[in-house]
Amino acid sequence: MPQVVIDGVQYVPAVAEHNPRIGIAISTHNRAGVLSQALEHQLKYLPPGALVVVVDDGSQPPAAVPDGVKLIRHEKSLGIVATKNASLAALMDAGCEHLFLWDDDAWPVADSWWLPYITSPEPHLAYQFLDLAGARKLNDIAVLYRDVKHVAYTGQRGVMLYYHRSVIERVGGFDPIYGRGMYEHSDLALRIHNAGLTSWAFADVVGSEKLIHSLDEHEQVERSVPRPDREEQVKRNVKIHNERRDTGYPGPTQSGVAWSAVPRAAQNQITAALVAQTTEALRGLNYDKANWQAVFSASGDITVILPDGSTFFGPSWNKISELLNSIDPDAIQALANQIHADAEQVAVDRLDVDAKAAQASNDAATSSTAATNATAANTAAQSAKTDAINAKIAAEAARDAAQEANPTLQLTKAANLSDVADVATARSNIGAAAKGANSDITSITGLTTPLSLGQGGVGATTQSGARNTLGVPAGITQQMISAWVSFNGSNGIMNGGFGVSSVTRNSAGNYTVNFSTPLTTNYAAISLATAGSGAGVATGQCGMISAGLNSATFVTFSNTFSQVDSAAVYFAAVGGRS
């Protein structure tokens, strides 16, 4: 490998197999199928040179891992706290700077998923999901803060935990006081925050849902800790956790007191600023080191990582040098001259092509006009031919008719049809009605003059004119029944009637008689009601409520003038027609 020296300092690759910057530890217990999926995704999206460790907490049968993955096994299950501490120890002993602790039911799903975490100034972050992805919701945490890079919550899930090595060296690992687990990762996050090392206790990078998939979030996996054990641990540990949270517990020390007598506010501000600035400076130096190493030593295209975590691609110095060395200036100049000459010839040829194209267009237009005229002439000739044929056919038909004509059968105009030999047959042939008594005329549609009484009509075209002709008094229609009905008073069902479409009864016991055809003028309403078994209720025991041209509404009364439902009701409207 080429050696690169800048300002007297020899640079080596930023990521080497013997000293990985990124460590990934996966804890598992009795979930071989889930672990297999996790390893498949971890290796697919593995950071360059990263170390992968699986800590098997007493699985039966023991967990199996592929080549290149380190396996640490507890022959007997020790619980979450011991397993996570074993993960931290394995990664830190290997010299890892960035520590990623994964449950076996979560894994990365995108390239460079690790970049937002290691480029963040926050030395501790964790993959978070606000709530379950399905219909069931926990509603146990909320968003506390959000900006373009980070989002902080009121609690922590723990499926993927990221730590910079410095915070573990400062506050230690997971506290064994939590036994087999539950609340151990939240306690560590609070201790890191209370030591002034993080801006928020529980935070994640923005957009992590596109980088990481959690089976637990989607409720697609059975818990590795049985529910009774989990509930017992939660009941025991929640009191310890909440008391430490509420008192700002900074973590255990040898003396049992805080590490420093410096006021907490000042300690937090100084330490946080120092850690953030130091971390950012170190990361910038490491990126510069890795970028320069790639620029001078790589042979092809390289990826340059900027301090803010963004990247861009381009050729290395070796590739640029090779490209420059491969260039032949004389050949390029000859090629340029040939291109210039070809361009000039193309311009000349273009003028000739344009002229020939214009001539071809004119010739095509002339040919099109000639074709159109020929088509029109052909059409006219065909039409003349058809007319001649039709004329010939008509002449031949006239000739045949003249030869077949019988002069004895022809009528003469002067005789005015008086010379018809068989009048009855002729009338029948032309559809004419016979005179006198006959059944030929069945309707008269064109008559405009009314038939007189003597002709069997009324001598008028209006009702009033017909009454005058027939001598009917003018008010006779107002003395006739225009509508009547008989119905059951209990349910309004009609027994019979004329000019009435229906009878309705409302909740107050009122009857409404609806006319089939609205009346046109005033009318007299007559009603009669009978009680059960035909016992009569005197006429007049029906009280009218309203009378209109479309309907009439009334009620029936008993002999004591109480409103009742009668067994039979009769109603008639007299007049109402003009």
Image (cartoon, grey):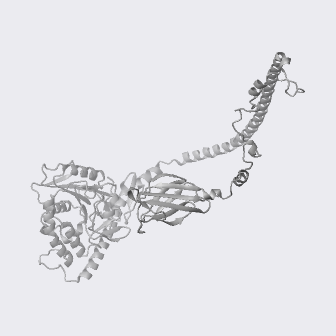
Asked whether 218 or 448 is in front, the reply is 448
Looking at the image, can residue 436 be seen?
yes
Looking at the image, can residue 49 be seen?
no
Which residue extends farthest top? 403
- Residue 179 falls in which quadrant of the image? bottom left
Asked whether 405 or 223 is in front, the reply is 405
Q: In the figure, 501 relative to 288: above or below?
A: above
Residue 329 drawn at (x, y percent): 54, 49
Q: In the figure, 367 relative to 47: above or below?
A: above
Q: In what quadrant of the picture does the C terminus appear?
A: bottom right
Residue 268 drawn at (x, y percent): 26, 78
Q: What count of labels does the image hold? A: 0
**Which residue is painted at 64% across and 56% down in the image?**
476
**Which residue is painted at 83% across and 19% down in the image?**
409
Q: In this view, does 123 lie to the left or right of 331?
A: left
Q: Is residue 298 left or right of residue 22?
A: right
Residue 293 drawn at (x, y percent): 35, 58
Residue 308 drawn at (x, y percent): 37, 66
Asked whether 348 or 149 is in front, the reply is 149
Which residue extends farthest right? 414
Asked whether 268 or 238 is in front, the reply is 238
Q: In this view, does 204 lie to the left or right of 417?
A: left
Which residue extends farthest left? 76
**Which residue is painted at 69% across and 36% down in the image?**
442
